[in-house]
Image: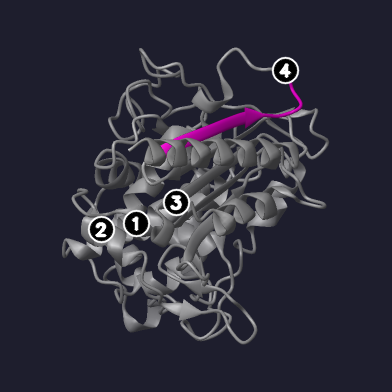
Amino acid sequence: MRTRTRTRTRTRTGIAARLAAAAQAVDTPGIVIAVSHRGHRTVHCGGSAPPPAVPRDQQRYEIGSASKTFTGLLLAELVGTGRLLYDDVAAHHLAPGRTPDTAPRNPATLRHLITHTAGLPALPADFYPQAVRRWSTDPYGGYPAERVVAAYLRTRPRHRPGTRWHYSNFGASVLGHTLAAATATPWEELITHHVLAPLGLTDTRLHPEGTPGAGADGPCADGPCAGGADTGGPAPGRPGADATGHRPNGVTPVPGLVMGGFQPAGAVRATPSDLLTYLEAHLDPSGTPLETALHAVRRPVLRRGLGHRHTHTLTWFQHPSPQGPLYFHAGATTGQQAFLGFRPATHTAVVAVATRRIRLRDTFIATAYALLSEESG
């Protein structure tokens, strides 16, 4: 018994040392790296800025494109409960009752949209003119959901859906709006009641603090989901607060990112603890409220092409390793970065968040990925 205890202690000490070294390797004002290994969590906070009033590991971080894993899980849950089919044509839900002469131009399905194979560009063509003047602070806020849908319905696919992979915030956003249209329920309400609440993600939000929808009693509380006024700020009894992101220089702060009509592609902000809870559900879906959906998003559905290691599930990039496949997704906003990854074979999950958008010589993703790929216990 003592031998087992000593082994566990050495393992935890080794993980803590590796997290500290990893944090040192990334030049950012604030960083949190958290690991769940066989049910035990280890968290390290660091960064060049002085420690904030609210501890770094209790702040909520923008996870950017890693939000797509939440929208993909929502899709899997709605399909698993029989409300939708992966092969539903998105435009049929977004523009029902069209005649053949006025039928939408894109036959892409829900599966195509979530796997980036719908033949769409990264963003709509008319997105850039309105965003360029505020590209580094608020590029998405001026482009609402109705405009995303209208742009999609008039966009012809660049290639036949399902034949080529091209990463698209546009497509993931259209998927979220399609799910809302098909269920007659706002996307925020869907994601809250079908993903966040069942998994117990009580300190995850879909808006920056102080903006409409950033309610105090849970995701989207007192906001558009409930139809009330914004109360702003963290929930009573919880010290959570939004982390402040920074420009690439690591000094200039940027405001919290408002995603406008692109919420399904990048709106999630959460504490490292909530993000570990989310990944732990993926590690062992058994007995969770989303068991079927969580198993579904681990199945590979496509390969990017010759020379790529990536296999894609509905929501995750998947890489092979000697100790079983790695699943991961990264994200970046105007001032923050995030990495989420898990490896079921070693019962390991890794969350890394940073308060700087690192564009050149980015060590953040490589460092977080190395922790996931090397951690074998």
**Residue 186, above or below 179:** above
Q: Is mark 2 on a helix, strand or loop?
A: helix
Q: Name the residue under label 2.
A: 77
Q: Give the number of the mark in front: 3 or 4.
A: 3
Picture quadrant where residue 22 is located:
top right
Instruction: Find the distance from the CA under tag 3 to the CA under tag 4.
Output: 30 Å
Instruction: Find the distance from the CA under tag 3 to the CA under tag 1.
Output: 20 Å
Residue type highlighted by circle 3 = Thr
Residue type highlighted by circle 1 = Leu
Q: Is mark 4 on a helix, strand or loop?
A: loop
Q: Quadrant of the N terminus?
A: top left
Determine the residue positioned at 44% across, 60% down.
174
For marks 3 and 4 on the same chain, the one whose residue lies earlier in the sequence? 4
Q: Is mark 3 on a helix, strand or loop?
A: strand
Q: From the top left corner, tell me how far across and down residue 227 is, in percent.
A: 29, 29
Q: From the top left corner, tell me how far across and down residue 35 is, in percent.
A: 50, 42
Residue 73: mark in rendering:
1
Magenta stretch?
A: 40-50
- Mark 2 and 1 residues: CB-CB less than 8 Å, in contact? yes
Q: What element carries label 1?
A: helix
Picture quadrant where residue 17 is located:
top right
Q: Mark 3 points at which residue?
A: 348
